[in-house]
Image: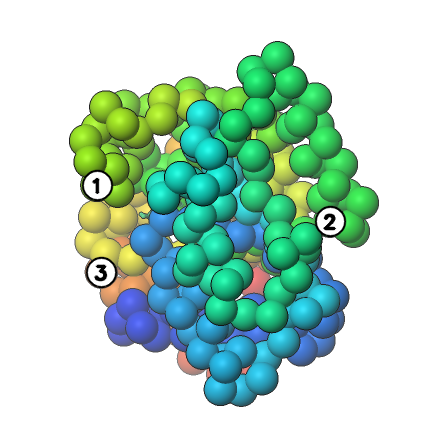
Amino acid sequence: MRVIITKDYYELSREASVVISSLINKKPGCVLGLATGSTPLGLYRELVRLHKEEKLSFSSVKTFNLDEYYGLNPSHPQSYRHFMDTNLFRHIDIKPENTFVPEGNIKSEEAEEYCRGYEEEIKKNGGIDLQVLGIGGDGHIAFNEPGSSLGSRTRIVALDARTIADNARFFNKAEEVPRFALSMGVGTILEAREIILLAAGSNKAPILAQALEGPITSMVTASAIQFHPRVTVITDEEAACSLARYPYYKFIRDAEQKINTPLF
Ligand code: GLP
């Protein structure tokens, strides 16, 4: 696993944008897995800048989002579809029909079939080349709350009290936060060919250390990325400060620059 420690959030966002833009340059029709939350906002801003100022084109790119609140219409200002449209899709040349975000307003009796279809759509498009992840305060990736099977697939999940409290900041009050979501599973995420996990801010420090250096456990679903052969964690100094192997990650980064090869 590569762990890149950046001096601040801006640099983190830039590093992440370099991973994505290099992939698009190499494979213009690549499939990206995308995340929501505050953490990737800087990355999306940077991708918009690269599109506008450096002609990075998303015209053949396809995207699959990790998750969506269950019960929200796509037009709801807190839906993840709305988040992606306003923070990224509307500002780049991606084709709307190439952007997939789970639909939050399907009927519960159709959910199983719908989730199976979402996974099939990923496969039909050749699988995810690069998955962007954030990490929740309780260690979740997508909405895979503590206790989610590490083999889980796309499904309806119930949100943990901690997640509802964390995400209440986007709503008028905690009672408005949906209690359920549609989420790719841990098993789905691990099938991506490459993963980048972003973490920023001191409040993520303890959980990031558990996810990267603690045991692999369904109680911290982000720890499952330890199974994956091509993971790059990009973290700012604040989120990295509880990592026991901090000096080693810095050393590896210098070594990579010397031999000009990523060291996973
Ligand atoms: C939500 C999303 C996750 C995201 C997490 C962290 O719960 N479902 O995909 O990683 O929030 O959000 P933030 O980046 O705002 O800390």
> Which is more foreground, mark 1 or mark 2?
1
Name the image quarter holding residue 6. bottom left
Badge 1 crowding class, 10 Å Cα cut-off, few under 14, some 14 to 19, many 20 or more, is few
> Which is more foreground, mark 1 or mark 3?
1
Circle on res. 127: 2
Under mark 2, the amino acid is: Gly
Circle on res. 238: 3
Residue that label 1 marks: 169
Do the residues under discs 2 and 3 have CB atoms within 8 angstroms? no
Label 2 CB sits under 8 Å from any ligand 1 atom: no
Disc nearer the start of the sequence (2/3): 2
Disc nearer the start of the sequence (1/3): 1
Name the image quarter holding residue 260. bottom right
- Name the residue nearer the viewer: 217 or 150: 150
Position of residue 167 measured from the top left corner of the image (x, y, whole percent): 28, 37
Q: How far apart are marks 1 and 3 (CA)?
A: 21 Å
Disc nearer the start of the sequence (1/2): 2
Do the residues under discs 1 and 3 have CB atoms within 8 angstroms? no
Quadrant of the image for the C terminus? bottom right
**Residue 103 vertical placement versus 260 (above, below):** above
Position of residue 131 measured from the top left corner of the image (x, y, whole percent): 57, 53
Secondary structure of residue under mark 1: helix
**Residue 15 vertical placement versus 183 (above, below):** below
Residue drawn at point x = 68 percent, y = 35 percent: 118
Secondary structure of residue under mark 3: helix
